[in-house]
Amino acid sequence: MNHCLVALLLVLCSSLSLAQTIHPSSSDPGCCSEKTSLPYTYNPEDNKVLLQLYVTNNSSEKEVFYEGKYDPWKDNKKNHLYEQVYMIPPGSLPISEGKFMDQTEVANIHYQEFLFYITKDSAKYLDKEYMPQLDNKFKSKYFLNPEFYFYPVVGVTHQNAQAYCEWRAKVLNVGLKDMLKNQVKKYKYAGRLPSEEEWKKIAGNVEEEVNSRLYNFGKKEWSFFEEDIVANRFAPSSILSRVDYEGYTQNFLVQDPMSLDIEIPFYIYSFSHNTLGFYNFYGNVKELVAEGYAIGGSFQTSFSADELFDHDEVQAYRTDVGFRCLTEIARRR
């Protein structure tokens, strides 16, 4: 895995100093993982060494609710958290000194990467133990479907979500150790789920972050709906007659006869980021926290500020419960 390590170091270094020009999508996933910087392959001969990605159609999820790129380095020039001595892990933003939160929910492709490497590195079929607990339709047509690479992974138990966060930090530490070998001050990352208190702090004020919004759809939007959403039976074909959608700046269930009625969450970079630059904290999927339950709203819940922080204990076979990780500095010397 030496060539992977070299790529990891190069990509990790660049990702810490420069923001991506665009967000990845299923039709344009880029060279490497957003969460670990490990490279992908499109060559079937390398599929035992690197995670194999598959070609998707030309329709992009970015055509629908995507509102553009948030550039944290451009928008935080005076924020001291972006000048700290610790490197910001890829795919995350600093929330305090030495503590970093994922900018988005963990996506299907990120979790598939985890399953691939724990099996490869152990030479055992450990992926079965960590596989999302979903029915056959959602497993084959959603989790394992390349068209939904960058949609939130769902149906993951609290224990396995924590295992993913820990694994990801270990992968980053492989590159970090070599990058810091000539420095006097060395450290390593540790990964975990955020606590409810940490999650609420970054989610921000509900009344400020969630607003009503009218979305207009054109040919590109409906092409994506038809080829990916309707074709995979996650929405009735009747939605293709719509020209607009009255919703929110977060992905909630809209109690309206003209709602889109889609059975899955949406692209991890869709809708409006909050004031700190994080996506989909209040909607899309509920999120697991360290205490063992999920909080927040989802595409299956109506927008109700009173219910957003209820503790939801059910995780298995849930298509509206996901998670994001918190990475922190575990050791300083």
Image: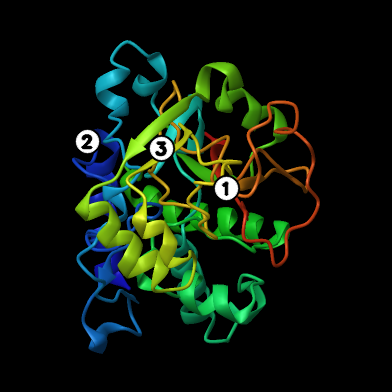
- Residue linked to disc 2: 18
Percent x, y of residue 84: 39, 22
Is tag 3's residue or tag 1's residue first in the polypeptide sequence? 3
Residue 310 in view of the camera? yes
Mark 3–mark 1 CB contact (< 8 Å): no
Q: What distance separates the C-alpha of mark 1 from that of mark 2? A: 32 Å
Q: What distance separates the C-alpha of mark 3 from that of mark 1? A: 12 Å
Residue 273 in view of the camera? no
**Local crowd at mark 3 within 10 Å, few (<14), some, or many (≥20)?**
many
> Tag 2: residue type?
Leu
Say above or below: 103 vs 208: below
Q: Which of 118 and 179 lies nearest the eye of the viewer?
A: 118
> Tag 3: residue type?
Phe
Find numbered disc 3 in the image and state the secondary structure of the residue it sits on: loop
Q: What distance separates the C-alpha of mark 2 from that of mark 3? A: 23 Å
Q: Is residue 42 left or right of residue 160?
A: left
**Local crowd at mark 2 within 10 Å, few (<14), some, or many (≥20)?**
few
- Residue linked to disc 1: 299
Percent x, y of residue 114: 49, 67
Find numbered disc 1 in the image and state the secondary structure of the residue it sits on: loop
Which residue is depicted at the point 35% across and 59% down?
240
Q: Which of 302 and 201 lies nearest the eye of the viewer?
A: 302
Which residue is depicted at the point 58% across and 35% down?
282
Say above or below: 21 vs 59: above
Percent x, y of residue 322: 60, 53
- Residue linked to disc 3: 271
Q: Which mark's residue is nearer the viewer, 1 or 2?
A: 1
Count of numbered labels shown in the rendering: 3
Find numbered disc 2 in the image and state the secondary structure of the residue it sits on: loop
Q: Quadrant of the N terminus?
A: bottom left
Is tag 2's residue or tag 3's residue first in the polypeptide sequence? 2
